[in-house]
Structures are given as C-alpha cells and as structure tokens.
Amino acid sequence: MRLYTMNLDIAYDEKVIVKNLSVTIPDKKITTIIGPNGCGKSTLLKAMTRLIPYKEGQVILDGKEIHKENTKELAKKLAILPQSPDHPSGLTVYELVSYGRFPYQAGFGRLTKQDKEIIDWALDATGLLELKYRPVDSLSGGQRQRAWIALALAQDTDIIFLDEPTTYLDIAHQLEVLELLERLNREEDRTIVMVLHDLNHAARFAHFIIAMKDGRIVKTGTSEEVIDRNVLREIFQIEAIVGKDPLTKKPLCYTYNLIK
C-alpha cells in the first residue's frame, strides 16, 4: 500500500466536511472519486496532497505521514492539478511546463540538461511539442489542460491527482484529456486519482471508484460494483437505468429521474 488514509477528519473552521474516512488508493491504477456537490470530493483530494490540513487521522505515503514529509521530497512523489488552475499571463507553454522541475532545482534554479529532456518528453507525451513556444493564453481549452498535465508530468512523479480535469471542456476535449490520462497510466504506470462529475466517464476510465456522500464513503470498487442503480440511488437520490456500453463493455447510465 503506497497511499492510504486512516480515520481522516477534515474541517473548515469548525465545520467537519470529511468524517472518519479510511481508503486505500490502488497503485498504478486509475481511481475516480464521484459524489454530489459539497460531499467532500475535492476536500479529500486536497488533504491527500497536503494542500489543506486535516483535523484528525493520517494520510500515509510510502510508510510516512505526508504531514511530516519535506515539501520538495513530497513534490517528487505526487503532483496535483487543481480545479481551474491559474498562471501568470505571458507564459509560454514551455515556461509553464518548466515549473514542474522546481522540486529538483537548487541554487539559482537553472534548468539542467536532464530537466530540459524531461520537459521535452512531457510536451511530447501530451502532444504539445510543436506548441512549446506558444503563449498559454492563446491555447484552446483542451490544449491548455494538456499543458497543465504536462507540468504535472515534468514533476516526474508516480502519482498524479486531478480535480475535475474535464471542467469547462467540450465533449471532444474531455475525451482527449481522459484518453491521455489513460495512456499515461497504461504506458507509464502512473497512478491517477481524479474527481469526476460525469458518471459514464468515471465508469469508462477508472479501475477503482470511490463514491462519497456527506463526507463519507458509501461504496468503493470497480465500475461494475459502484455504477449500480442502488448505489446511485443512495448517493444522488436518483432512479437510474444502468446498462452496458456496447463500445467499452463498461456500465453506462442511460437515463435517470429524481426521486420525489
């Protein structure tokens, strides 16, 4: 077990958002976290990457509590792509992606030959090599999201967290980003953990799904175990018709109605 939580409580001020949560993230797999708005999905993601503190419990990575890890050393193990990330205006794609090498730099922070090779590899892996000198501001939504994923790749971590990476993207760009993450998992053995709203995307791309409601885990397992009408009824208060995707053979939520 590389990464897991034990009895985790996360609170904003005195309001507890996540309560007594214990979960293990499968290594070298794609994990998605689903659930209604405000259930604690993004909060859990931020706590597991030390973006926010937790009130009680532990987050363990490679046998050590992340709260006690050196910041640069932790950044060599996991990368986080937050929801709607912001960047200084005027940056080129190459400059943005080069920020991923920060944990490895010392002194004046000049890029080494190895740094440059890894940056070019990350740009190539995300299909952005020909756009490396383009301003980030001039990119399409899908290209810009791929640039942020390239930054995470340049960190050269085994684990990548993404908070709703398909938000604000059209359906073609959503598929582009998710297929890229799937390829990184398959070809590079990257552990991917992401929050998704689209149930069919979660079912199609995840090996392991964490379904949350009111700061607790309702169900974990494969897409067949979690994208189930009874689980969806409990989590989202919907009556869903779930079948099998003829293309992927994964569960497919065809339609649903609110429970009245």
Image: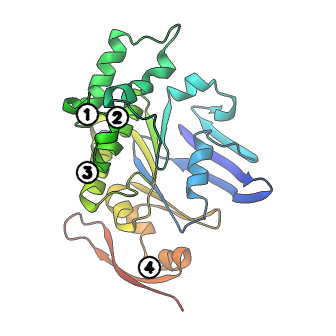
Circle 2/circle 3 CB separation < 8 Å: no
Q: How many marks?
A: 4
Real-space Cα separation, disc 2 to disc 4, in angstroms = 37 Å
Mark closer to the observer (2, 4): 2
Percent across and percent down for residue 189 are: 35, 36
Label 1, residues with CA under 10 Å away: few <14, some 14-19, many ≥20: some
Real-space Cα separation, disc 2 to disc 3, in angstroms = 14 Å
Residue 252 appears in the figure: yes
Label 2, residues with CA under 10 Å away: few <14, some 14-19, many ≥20: many
Label of residue 229 in the image? 4
Percent across and percent down for residue 141 are: 32, 50
Please tell me which of labels 1 and 2 falls first in the chain: 1
Disc 3 is placed on an element classified as helix
Residue sitting farthest toward the bottom: 260
Please tell me which of labels 4 and 3 falls first in the chain: 3
Percent across and percent down for residue 32 are: 45, 55
User: Amino acid type of disc 4?
Assistant: Arg
Query: Which residue appears at 64% of the width and 41% of the height?
Result: 59
Circle 1/circle 2 CB separation < 8 Å: yes
Quadrant housing the C terminus: bottom right
Please tell me which of labels 3 and 1 falls first in the chain: 1
Query: Which residue appears at 66% of the width and 43% of the height?
Result: 52
Mark closer to the observer (4, 1): 1
Q: Which residue is mark 3?
A: 176
User: Amino acid type of disc 1?
Assistant: Ala
Q: Which residue is mark 1?
A: 125
Label of residue 150 in the image? 2
Percent across and percent down for residue 138 are: 29, 41
Disc 4 is placed on an element classified as helix
User: Amino acid type of disc 2?
Assistant: Ala
Q: Is residue 58 left or right of residue 254?
A: right
Which quadrant of the structure image shows residue 1?
A: top right
